[in-house]
Amino acid sequence: MLYHDGQRVNGPDAALYSRAKAEGSCSEAARLVPGVRVECRYNGQTL
């Protein structure tokens, strides 16, 4: 799940993401929000 300021911001389909899709979504979030720390995990492991 993806949270921003304590609020869930992803849809229920996130549980079905492949690792590649999760990495792509994480990279996109980090690129779109410069100056904000983005940490992404997939199956409990940091990407």
Image (tube, rainbow, N blue to C red):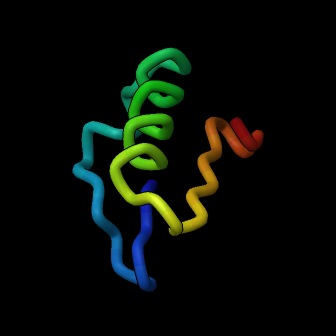
In the image, residue 9 above or below residue 19: below
Q: Nearer the viewer, residue 13 or 35?
A: 35
Q: Which residue is the extreme one toward the right?
A: 45
In the image, residue 22 above or below residue 7: above
Q: Residue at x 52, y 67 (%)?
A: 35
In the image, residue 23 above or below residue 10: above
Residue 16: % across, % down: 37, 28
Q: Is residue 38 left or right of residue 32?
A: right
Residue 41: % across, % down: 64, 45
Q: Nearer the viewer, residue 38 or 7?
A: 38
Q: Residue at x 72, y 45 (%)?
A: 44
Residue 3: % across, % down: 43, 68
Q: Is residue 21 left or right of residue 9?
A: right
Q: Quadrant of residue 34?
A: bottom left
In the image, residue 17 above or below residue 27: above
Q: Which residue is the extreme one toward the front?
A: 35
The quarter of the picture where the N terminus appears is bottom left
Q: Residue at x 40, y 73 (%)?
A: 4
The quarter of the picture where the C terminus appears is top right
Count of numbered circles on the image: 0
